[in-house]
Amino acid sequence: MVGRLRLTVPLAAAELPDESFRNTPPARGSTNSMAALPPTAKPTDPKPAVGGTRLDAIARGEPIQPVIHKSLQGIDPVVEVKDFNLWYGTKQALFDVNISFPRGQVTAIIGPSGCGKSTLLRCINRMNDLIENVETKGEMLINGQSIYAPGVDVIELRKRMGMVFQKPNPFPMSIFENVVYPLRIDGERDRNIIREVAAQSLRGAALWDEVKDRLKDSALGLSGGQQQRLCIARAIAGEPDVLLLDEPCSALDPIATSKVEDLIQELRGDYSLIVVTHNMQQASRVSDFTAFMYLGRLIEYGETSEIFTRPKLKETESYVTGRFG
Ligand SMILES: Nc1ncnc2c1ncn2[C@@H]1O[C@H](COP(=O)(O)OP(=O)(O)OP(=O)(O)O)[C@@H](O)[C@H]1O
């Protein structure tokens, strides 16, 4: 149950010759956008096509190629996003996004308010289907299977993804029933399995010791930080292929934040996590890879240590050092 996913990032990526390469859109039908990149691609000068900064060019509506670090070449992706666009009515919020999220790792999505971080995250489990007037173009895959193909069972799809929101959202029921909720809706009746999953998920979410003697109490009586870890326990009880976390600590105090951050790091390896955060320190503390977005575009994507200490673009550097946004 907990701990079934294993890290499978090939080491060969570390031996590739080039410092960086452009993320040219993959061939249609490819199951791995990184695989579609030429293995001997030369690093290209990351200057904007027209004068001024990249960000100026984006603001003028010019297309911009993101810079994807070589450390992402050859990854085993859990989720792949290909040429993905989204419109809220007439307003376009995502522009030709191409990004692959590595299995068993923590990926942070950062960028100024309104750049499309949450929109991108919500598209992965098709939560945007719930909003009127949303249109999408492009493709997303989970474990190589289309998320948007006609006929996809969205309820089954969402069961493969755990989602944790800004504000903890425990259900008004006991701690135990909250955790085992995914099993109840799946019709699991074996009491031993249900008990075992509850204990394992609460341990996995670093909450067991705090709640083991009060499993029948209402989840609403827990502190905010405990409630958020309970929501993570509930998410992992469903054995998701990927955990989507949308600013999971923004409503928590520093101590609760630190516990959730520790938990995110502990879940790495067993789970694939995608975390939207405003908090640069948090992204640098918890994630293996970081994607920087601006005005609905992916700008730069690489290993977190590189994005924060040696970004390839001055625009990324300006953002991570707090000079804009
Ligand atoms: N339901 C909606 N209807 C219309 N526009 C929306 C909707 N949700 C988001 N937007 C717009 O889409 C753009 C991207 O929003 P999104 O919430 O994805 O950005 P974000 O980077 O997550 O922002 P923040 O960090 O402030 O949460 C913004 O311009 C936002 O106003």
Image (cartoon, rainbow, N blue to C red):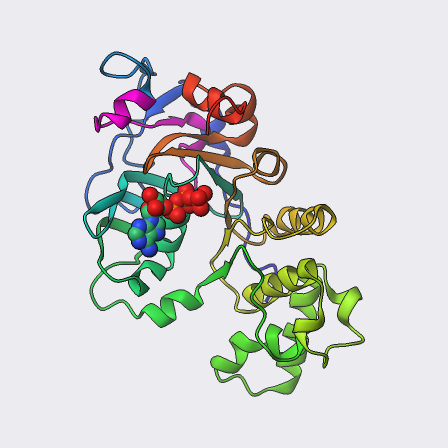
Camera-nearest residue between 122 and 195: 122
The structure residue drawn at horizontal position 71% and vertical position 51%, both measured from the top left corner, is 259
Residue 253 magenta = no
Coordinates of residue 40 in the picture (x, y in percent): 32, 21
Coordinates of residue 144 in the picture (x, y in percent): 33, 53
Indicate left or right for 263 with 210 as reference: left
Residue 223, picture quadrant: bottom right
Camera-nearest residue between 267 and 54: 54
Q: Is residue 313 visible?
A: no
> How many labels, in total?
0
Q: Is residue 197 above or below residue 257?
A: below
Indicate left or right for 25 with 292 as reference: left
The structure residue drawn at horizontal position 26% and vertical position 22%, both measured from the top left corner, is 57
Residue 64 magenta = yes
Indicate left or right for 170 with 94 as reference: right
> Which residues make up the magenta segment?
55-76
The structure residue drawn at horizontal position 53% and vertical position 54%, both measured from the top left corner, is 166
Coordinates of residue 10 in the picture (x, y in percent): 48, 37
Q: Is residue 140 above or below residue 202?
A: above
